[in-house]
Amino acid sequence: MFIVSGGRGTGKTKALLEKVKDENGILVCDDPTKMRERAHKYGITGLEIICYEEFRGSSSDRPAYIHDINKYLKYLDSKVQGYSLSLD
């Protein structure tokens, strides 16, 4: 499992985009248009970027990487208020 964490402005998104590119994965986020613009600013092109709804209906075998897991969990169920995470 690839996990990137850090404060605002520490390069989390860029690191995730690079991993998606390296692994020929799919990036899942709340706003694919905005994320494509960010990737382009970093010089990262050719990514498949989809929204949460598309991901839930996807049957792709490619690895998926979720940008901002907190937003994704809220999308799944607005009652989610916390979670634990093991960094093994």
Image (cartoon, helix red, strand yellow):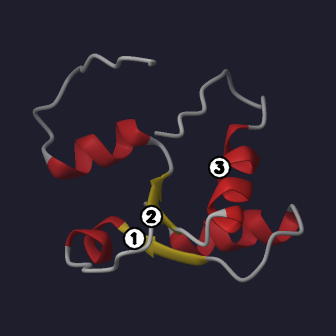
Q: Secondary structure at mark 1?
A: strand
The amino acid type of the residue labelled 2 equals Pro
Residue assigned mark 1: 51
Labels 2 and 1: the sequence-earlier one: 1
Is 75 displayed left or right of 1 in the figure? Answer: left
Which quadrant of the rendered structure holds the C terminus? top left
Question: In terms of depth relative to the viewer, which is nearer, 41 or 27?
Answer: 27
Residues under labels 3 and 1: Cα distance? 16 Å
Q: Secondary structure at mark 2?
A: loop
The vertical placement of 7 against 34, above or below, is above
Tag 1: amino acid: Cys
Instruction: Say which mark, if any, is on residue 63.
Output: 2
- Mark 2 vs mark 1: in front: 2
The quarter of the picture where residue 79 lies is top left
Residues marked 3 and 1 touching at CB (< 8 Å): no
Left or right of 51 on screen, residue 2: right
What residue is disc 3 on? 16
